[in-house]
């Protein structure tokens, strides 16, 4: 299903992540720049979902054992994506630092 409301920045971030995902299968043996691109793509996608403009719809639940509590909150979804995006941002900066250090 095509999403017409997806911004160009979101399309680029998702494209980078998906292209780099193919390289991620061999992430341990992939060159440092490929790993950096993969992490950067995921970080951009998460950052766009969490901090980008527009309305977001999140749905799902929290499960503990056999008990599931439904959760549908745009704020909670943005917080979760934001936290993961910040972690990916830190990893991406470290990956690019490694690329810089190995090429210098």
Image (spheres, helix red, strand yellow):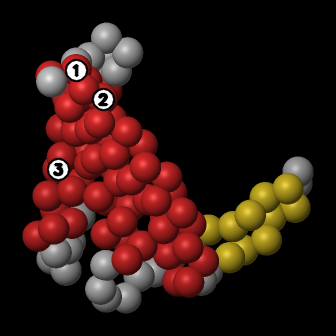
Q: Which residue is mark 1?
A: 102
Q: Is residue 31 above or below residue 86?
A: above
Determine contact: label 1, label 3, CB under 8 Å: no
Asked if residue 67 lies left or right of residue 88, the reply is right
Determine contact: label 1, label 2, CB under 8 Å: yes
Residue 1 lies in quadrant: bottom left
Residue 63: x, y in percent? 78, 58
At label 3, counting other C-alpha atoms closer than 10 Å, the crowd grade (few under 14, some 14-19, many 20 or more) is: some
Asked if residue 79 lies left or right of residue 47, the reply is right
At label 1, counting other C-alpha atoms closer than 10 Å, the crowd grade (few under 14, some 14-19, many 20 or more) is: few
Identity of the residue furthest to the front in this view = 104
The residue lying toward the viewer, choosing from 72 and 53, is 53
Residue 52: x, y in percent? 31, 79
Q: Is residue 63 visible?
A: yes
Q: Is residue 2 visible?
A: no
At label 2, counting other C-alpha atoms closer than 10 Å, the crowd grade (few under 14, some 14-19, many 20 or more) is: some
Report helix, strand or loop for mark 1.
helix
Asked if residue 31 lies left or right of residue 86, the reply is left
* Residue located 15% across and 24% down the image: 104
* Residue located 60% across and 77% down the image: 76
Report helix, strand or loop for mark 2.
helix
Q: Which residue is mark 3?
A: 15
The residue lying toward the viewer, choosing from 100 and 15, is 100
Report helix, strand or loop for mark 3.
helix
Report how far apart the C-alphas of labels 2 and 3 lie in the structure.
23 Å
Q: Which residue is mark 2?
A: 98
Residue 83: x, y in percent? 54, 63
Q: Earlier in the sequence, mark 2 or mark 3?
A: 3
């Amino acid at each position: 299903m095509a999403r017409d409301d997806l911004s160009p920045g979101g399309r680029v971030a998702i494209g980078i992540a998906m292209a780099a995902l193919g390289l991620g299968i061999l992430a341990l043996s992939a060159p440092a720049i490929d790993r950096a691109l993969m992490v950067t793509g995921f970080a951009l996608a998460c950052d766009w979902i969490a901090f980008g403009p527009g309305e977001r719809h999140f749905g799902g639940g929290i499960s503990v054992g056999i008990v599931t509590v439904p959760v549908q909150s745009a704020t909670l979804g943005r917080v979760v994506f934001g936290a993961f995006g910040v972690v990916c941002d830190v990893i991406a900066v470290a990956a690019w630092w490694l690329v810089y250090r190995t090429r210098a």
